[in-house]
Image (tube, helix red, strand yellow):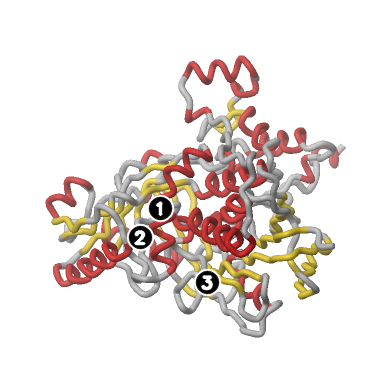
Amino acid sequence: MLNHDIVIIGAGVSGSAIARELSRYDLDIVVLEKQEDICSGTSKANSGIIHAGYDAPEGSLMASLNVEGNAMMDSWSEELDIPFQRIGSLVVCLEEEGMPFLEKLYQRGIKNGVPHLEIIDRQRLKQLEPHIAQDAVGALYAPSAGIVCPFELNLAMAENAVQNGVRFLFDAEVLSIDKIDQGFCVLTSKGKVLTKHVINAAGVHADTIHNMVSMQKMEIIPRKGEYVLLDKKAGKHVRHTIFQLPTKMGKGVLVTPTIHGNLLVGPTSEDVQDKEALNTTEKGLRDVIEKAKKTVQDLPMHMIITSFAGLRAHHPAHEFIIEEVKDVPGFIDVAGIESPGLSSCPAIGKKVAKWFQEKYDLVQKSDFQPRRKGLNHLYAINSHQKNALIQKDPRYGNIVCRCEMISEGEIVEAIHRPIPARSLDGVKRRVRAGMGRCQGGFCLPKVVEILAREQDGKTAKEITKSGKNSYFIAGNNKEDLL
């Protein structure tokens, strides 16, 4: 007898959205993730943009799921208790010769079903964005575009799936998959898992997983993007997400506020071979900065606090691949989920769940719980609520991260959630300790101490940055010297 109905490979936004939607039904579901936490791959390093949907070719799956996912984001953010803002986006044209291309983008958006699109002139553009470049002649304005925290969205979907019976297994790299009677045997670094169905949501590694079972081979190209993040003092330099006219390599370098008040600039776009190539380069960061200056004036680049890189899972067809593999019944690919994958994830989850529901006539659980209570964030509540929280647990009054004003209570809560933070990056993604101006220079030792204390039997030496062998502490100098 097979252990599980469905195994989902990958705990990024696609895998977690699918898990959440399938948890509506009476199914035994496990999510396998090779890293130590959710949101450890493509999902953790992106722009945090909920795209309007005018960029993808009309008639494409990418276009339809983008627009549908965008429309779902209000209800999902409310149910999952995460911040989401519709700040709108502007695709800026820097020369008159480019206006026909802007018109094509507008027409594509209309065909895709994007609401409230309009082409605006320089005067209106200047009113919306006082720091727009002097050369800007017009823009495509999409009020429906928004911003979200990809970490919080990913965590919220995964936690809600857990609430509804899904299990997540971390540090469980898939080593092989064998087709067996009525299902699959998935060999992981933590042992064998038997399942009736496999959903492949493995990001840049989706081709590796697909090619384990199918004779019709797939290729996923890692497309690297480098970013710089500016301090919150720079966060209001622009009010909307500012794009440049897109090229075949993507939407170009953008400038956008983040949901937490920083300013984000990037990304580059470079196809690479290494699926772990997350290093930043001097050339890449210089390129980001110079291109951003073409659309936005007076960018305060002296306020950069960090840089990072991410990899997009690019399919040569530049299209989402969401389908049952023809020569492997029961194996479903969710591959090539590059931008606008974050925007599309609610619709991706819904589409995959609908396939299962229609194929097997599934009945929704009577006790499905769509609502998830988020973490207590001091920055999101008023003084009265803060005082009440501190009265209940004094640890919420002990500030550990000065830059982001994150308390010990928030860190402890993150460690004891349904999907617990087990590393410094896990804490950082959930409550932002270490994401501020000093990038953990002040709070890191205290966070290490709290992680060790709250995880039974662990010592500070065993705490990692992001799992595996990423240890911070090699020894205790004082004891070694005595």
Say what secondary structure mark 2 lies in. Answer: loop
Residue occupying the point 81% across, 40% down: 458
Q: Which numbered disc, 1 or 3, marks the residue that appears first in the sequence? A: 1
Quadrant (top left/top right/bottom left/bottom right) for the N terminus: bottom right
Say what secondary structure mark 3 lies in. Answer: strand
* Mark 1: few/some/many CA within 10 Å (<14, 14-19, 20+): many
Give the side of residue 385 with respect to residue 143, left or right: right
Task: Decide if residue 34 is in sight here.
Answer: no
- Nearest the viewer among 80 and 362 is 362
- Which label number is shown at residue 198? none
- Nearest the viewer among 272 and 14 is 14
* Mark 2: few/some/many CA within 10 Å (<14, 14-19, 20+): many
Q: Which residue is denoted by mark 3 in the rendering?
A: 321
Q: Which residue is denoted by mark 1 in the rendering?
A: 70
Cβ–Cβ below 8 Å for labels 1 and 2? yes
* Mark 3: few/some/many CA within 10 Å (<14, 14-19, 20+): some
Residue 422, x across and y down, in percent: 71, 44
Q: Gap in Å between the C-alphas at discs 1 and 3? A: 19 Å
Q: Which residue is denoted by mark 2 in the rendering?
A: 53
